[in-house]
Amino acid sequence: MDKSVMIHSDRGTIKRVVEVDAPLLEAVKRTALEALQLWDPERSDFVVMKDSYTKTLKLPLKKEEYEAYSKFELRRGSKEAEVVIPIYITSFNNEWKEADYYDNEIFIVAPKLPDEDLEELKKRAMTATSEEQLEIGNLGGLEEDLEELDEEEEEEE
């Protein structure tokens, strides 16, 4: 059975990292149900957003790398490979300040990945929900990732 992981970040702190014995889409649904129980509809929006985590790998790939990443969108270049891994972000404790949107608390659900990738996703989750994002008005990397994806899609068209 495929396994997934759920990362719970609240105001810049990782509260939990849970391994889920379910394929990614089932884990997303389970996590969304948990988030619904925590959501206060009078104070916050509820959003489940599909995103991706992109990683560059040096060629040749080691056997372990190939096994870990071959089930995702793997693109090979002449010296490097790039893998695009689907992730889902559930935001259930957020706020609007003027025209800016801020996440206070999120769940990130991803396929079970090697530890170094899990650490990167934890950093993104912490940054996305940190107090600094309120002060500087950015979404801690997630917004930039979305902008990069939009640019890549436009280039492909």
Image: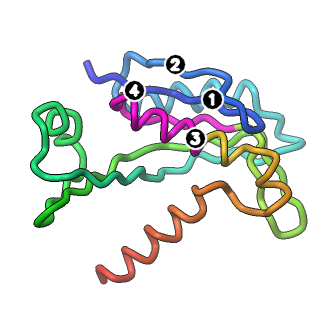
Residue bearing the label numbered 3: 123
Quickly name the residue at label 2.
18
Instruction: Say which amino acid is labelled 3.
Output: Lys
Across and down, in percent, residue 157 comes to: 30, 83
> For the residues marked 3 and 1, what is the alpha-carbon distance in whole angstroms?
11 Å
In the picture of the structure, the residue carrying the numbered disc 1 is 8
> At 65% from the left edge and 47% from the top edge, which residue is drawn?
47
Label 2 – label 1 distance at C-alpha: 8 Å
Q: Which residues are magenta?
A: 106-124
Nearer the observer, disc 3 or disc 2? 3
Secondary structure at numbered mark 2: strand
What residue appears at the point 40 percent right and 38 percent down from the top-left corner? 117
Residue 56: percent from the left, percent from the top?
Answer: 30, 54
Label 3 and label 2: CA atoms lie apart by 16 Å
What is the number of the mark on residue 76?
none
Viewer-proximal residue, 72 or 134?
A: 134
Give the vertical position of 134 relative to 67 (above or below). Answer: below
In terms of secondary structure, where does tag 1 sit? strand
- 10 Å neighbourhood of mark 2: few (<14), some, or many (≥20)? few
Q: Of marks 2 and 1, which one's residue comes earlier in the chain?
A: 1
Mark 3 or mark 1: which is in front?
3
When the figure is inspected, residue 148 is found, relative to residue 46, above or below; the finding is below
Three-letter amino acid code at disc 1? His
Element at label 3 = helix
**For residue 45: magenta?**
no
